[in-house]
Image: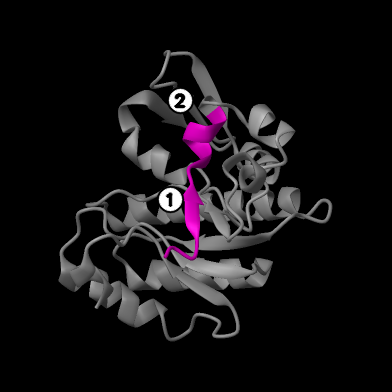
């Protein structure tokens, strides 16, 4: 009964590789799935593979969890991989702010994510893409930073907007405070996506 499935950009990039998926016509043809597919950007792996990566303004360099080789992932790389996967919804490459983070740490992470979002948007729309690109609101548990992130993303102009950096270990009360601050000003004419929600009680 699923209406949409998610493909993991980082892991598909490593294995079987975007070239193989693209040679088969993208993820729809590769998997024989006719309904929508969303691909993440690899940004969550910036968070989850902390011990294997190094962040710079260019992007992120990882040690592959498969064979240890160095893997580069920039905003442009993330867009190129998702274009090759031919997903219906692609996600901007960002840095998922960890919890806890100080306000200065969250600001630095958010502002870098916004610069990456602009670069990724420019790369994704160089030619007519197969789908649409969503921007990801970051800013940790700080509503003022979340609103600044949303303003930066809406100025760029995305097909949809996601809330990232939640469900990363924060108390429900802090998550709800972020949602209460950010949801009302999010563009109602665009799709909205609350990322990372898995537990049924988190969907209430």
Q: Is residue 100 magenta?
A: no
Residue 204 position (above or below residue 118):
below
The residue beneath circle 1 is 108
Q: Residue at x 63, y 52 (%)?
A: 87
Q: Give the camera-side residue of 56 and 133.
A: 133
List x then y, in percent, for residue 54: 43, 28
Quadrant location of the C terminus in the rendered image: bottom left
CA gap, disc 2 and disc 1: 20 Å
Residue 135 position (above or below residue 85):
below
Which residues are drawn in magenta? 1-13
Q: Give the camera-side residue of 108 and 68.
A: 68
The residue beneath circle 2 is 62
Can you tell which quarter of the image residue 21 is in?
A: top right
Q: Residue at x 62, y 39 (%)?
A: 30
Horizontal side of 88 relative to 62 (left or right) equals right
List x then y, in percent, for residue 107: 41, 56
Horizontal side of 99 relative to 6 (left or right) equals left
Nearer to us of marks 2 and 1 is: 2
Residue 162 position (above or below residue 51):
below
Q: Is residue 7 magenta?
A: yes
List x then y, in percent, for residue 196: 34, 58
- Residue contact at pointers 2 and 1, CB within 8 angstroms: no
Q: Residue at x 43, y 63 (%)?
A: 2
- Mark 2 vs 1, N-terminal side: 2
Quadrant location of the N terminus in the rendered image: bottom left
Mark 1: which secondary structure?
helix
Can you tell which quarter of the image residue 172 is in?
A: bottom left
Q: Residue at x 49, y 66 (%)?
A: 3
């Amino acid at each position: 009964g699923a209406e949409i499935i998610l493909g993991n950009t980082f892991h598909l990039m490593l294995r079987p590789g975007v070239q193989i998926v693209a040679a088969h016509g993208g993820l729809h043809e590769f998997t024989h799935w006719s309904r929508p597919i969303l691909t993440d950007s690899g940004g969550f792996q910036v968070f989850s593979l902390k011990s294997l990566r190094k962040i710079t303004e260019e992007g992120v360099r990882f040690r592959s969890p498969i064979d240890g080789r160095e893997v580069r992932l920039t905003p442009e790389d993330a867009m190129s991989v998702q274009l090759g996967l031919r997903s219906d919804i692609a996600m901007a490459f960002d840095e998922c702010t960890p919890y806890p983070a100080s306000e200065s740490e969250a600001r630095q992470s958010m502002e870098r994510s916004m610069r990456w979002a602009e670069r990724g948007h420019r790369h994704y729309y160089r030619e007519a893409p197969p789908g649409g690109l969503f921007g990801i609101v970051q800013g940790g548990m700080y509503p003022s930073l979340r609103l600044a992130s949303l303003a930066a993303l809406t100025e760029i102009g995305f097909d949809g907007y996601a809330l990232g950096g939640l469900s990363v270990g924060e108390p429900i009360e802090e998550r709800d405070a972020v949602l209460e601050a950010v949801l009302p000003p999010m563009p109602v004419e665009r799709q909205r996506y609350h990322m990372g929600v898995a537990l049924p009680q988190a969907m209430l």
